[in-house]
Amino acid sequence: KQEVTQIPAALSVPEGENLVLNCSFTDSAIYNLQWFRQDPGKGLTSLLLIQSSQREQTSGRLNASLDKSSGRSTLYIAASQPGDSATYLCAAASGGSYIPTFGRGTSLIVHP
Amino acid sequence: AAGVIQSPRHLIKEKRETATLKCYPIPRHDTVYWYQQGPGQDPQFLISFYEKMQSDKGSIPDRFSAQQFSDYHSELNMSSLELGDSALYFCASSLAGQGAAEAFFGQGTRLTVV
């Protein structure tokens, strides 16, 4: 059974810092890994999708990397802004139905 | 572009009542997933459908059932509601039949059981 862990659980940084969020998964036979953003009480917004054959994906100030052999993915946020404050979840898709299994998320606060 | 539509967005029910949540996947997507997210928790997989057939089952209680209809919309039926069923319920769809496609999530239905 796939298990996904995210470290740290919470992070508070001043505006402008570059930061790294970590995601690890136990079953390396994944098909893809997605990073999501969730604002309090709201839905899931997909940020980046990395297919199992890819090493990284970039979108604006976000860069996600994937190392299947070590069961790890990282989300790098450059020049963080207060508007980045949210919970960031990763989900690894595995199994016959490519079911995304989520981690508990990293709660990020970027203060001005 | 069309997204995954869930209805209703909010629902308040009393204990022991029933609730039906609806999900309209992105057109031509062949797979639907249902998730439950309790307060402060990660989304937990409940059940999935591929081409209108149940494909996988997660931690879905026996009081819950789901189906996917001929038009590909899906419904999650919840009976004998308990206070602990209060959560955000997400539906997602993908083109899994074409291999490891991205899962697109709806905005969720917030169910409150009082």
Image: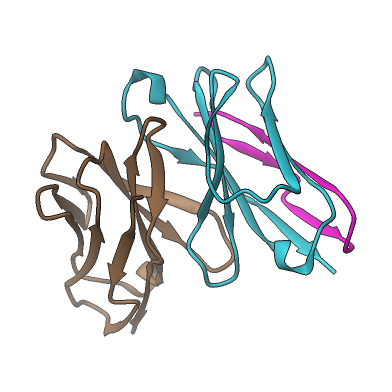
Chain colours: A brown, B cyan
**In the image, A55: left or right of B77?**
left
Residue at the farthest top position: B70
What residue range appears in magenta? Answer: B1-25
Name the foreground residue: A101 vs A95. A95
Quarter occupied by residue B113: bottom right
Q: Is residue B75 visible?
A: no
In the shown orientation, is residue A67 left or right of residue B96? left
Q: At which x and y percent is residue A2?
A: 33, 51
- B83 is within the stretch colored magenta: no
Q: Residue at x 23, y 60 (%)?
A: A24
Q: Nearer the viewer, residue B100 or A20?
A: B100
Query: Residue A93: percent from the left, percent from the top?
Result: 34, 42
Q: Which quarter of the figure is the C terminus of chain B placed in?
A: bottom right
Q: Is residue B24 above or below residue A69?
A: above
Q: Is residue B34 above or below residue B16?
A: above
Q: Residue at x 39, y 72 (%)?
A: A85
Q: Nearer the viewer, residue B21 or B47?
A: B47
Is B16 on the left-hand or right-hand side of A105?
Answer: right
Residue B8 forms part of the magenta stretch:
yes
Q: Is residue B42 at least partly visible in the picture?
A: yes
Measuring from the top left, give residue B27's x and y in whole percent.
54, 20
Q: Residue at x 31, y 72 (%)?
A: A81
Q: Position of residue B66 (x, y in %)?
A: 69, 35
